[in-house]
């Protein structure tokens, strides 16, 4: 299959998005959660909801698909389970930014970018 012709994402309802930008700009697509993969953070899953007429589908995309959106420092040490960890990564529906200098913090920053992504007006 020629990857140049592949869509970025397809929903079970038949809706397709050609590019990541199209997907993130769709007002009917919202970031809903995150499922961590501690061994390889890029394999964690961002959970999006496609809320359209007749569709309320959850769509998962690997965090690595969005890692290029992050331009900050990636910390070396993971703080999971320490006194400094608020445990956000263990709460699938918690989309808060992590204030700690933790290896996982970059993913939480990407979530903030996704939450604030500009949506196109419906009908455009």
Image (cartoon, helix red, strand yellow):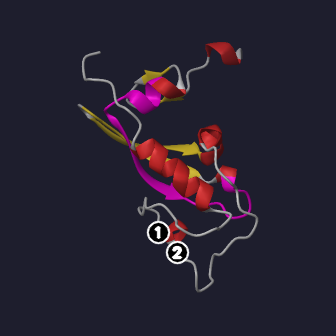
Answer yes or no: is residue 11 visible.
Answer: no
Q: Quadrant of residue 124?
A: top left
Residue farthest bottom in this picture: 83
| Residue for point 71% across, 14% down | 2
**Circle 2: is it few (<14), some (14-19), or many (20+) Cα within 10 Å?**
some
Q: Quadrant of residue 67?
A: top right
Q: Is residue 78 left or right of residue 25?
A: right
The Cα atoms of the two marked residues, 2 and 1, are separated by 7 Å
Q: From what the image shows, is residue 106 above or below residue 56?
A: below
| Residue for point 50% across, 56% down | 34
The quarter in which the N terminus is drawn is: top right
Question: Could you say which is closer to the camera, residue 76 or residue 9?
Answer: 76
Query: Is residue 28 a member of the stretch shown in magenta?
Result: yes
Q: Which residues are magenta?
A: 22-41
Which mark lies nearer to you, 2 or 1? 2
Return the residue at label 2.
87
Answer yes or no: is residue 123 visible.
Answer: yes
**Circle 1: is it few (<14), some (14-19), or many (20+) Cα within 10 Å?**
few
Q: Secondary structure at mark 1?
A: loop
Q: From what the image shows, is residue 15 above or below residue 68?
A: above
Dot label at residue 47: none
Query: Is residue 112 a member of the stretch shown in magenta?
Result: no
Q: Is residue 120 left or right of residue 84?
A: left
Q: From what the image shows, is residue 20 above or below residue 41?
A: above
Marks 2 and 1 close (CB-CB < 8 Å): yes
Question: Could you say which is closer to the camera, residue 63 or residue 13?
Answer: 63
Dot label at residue 91: 1
Q: Secondary structure at mark 2?
A: loop
């Amino acid at each position: 299959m020629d990857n140049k012709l592949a869509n970025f994402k397809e929903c079970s309802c038949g809706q397709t998005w050609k590019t990541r930008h199209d997907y993130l700009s769709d007002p009917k697509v919202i970031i809903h959660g995150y499922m961590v993969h501690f061994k390889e953070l890029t394999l964690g899953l961002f959970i999006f909801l496609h809320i359209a007429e007749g569709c309320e589908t959850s769509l998962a995309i690997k965090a690595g698909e969005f890692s290029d959106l992050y331009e900050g420092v990636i910390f070396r040490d993971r703080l999971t389970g320490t006194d400094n960890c608020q445990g956000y990564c263990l709460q699938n529906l918690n989309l808060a930014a992590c204030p700690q200098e933790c290896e996982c913090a970059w993913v939480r920053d990407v979530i903030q970018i996704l939450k604030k992504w500009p949506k196109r007006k419906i009908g455009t």
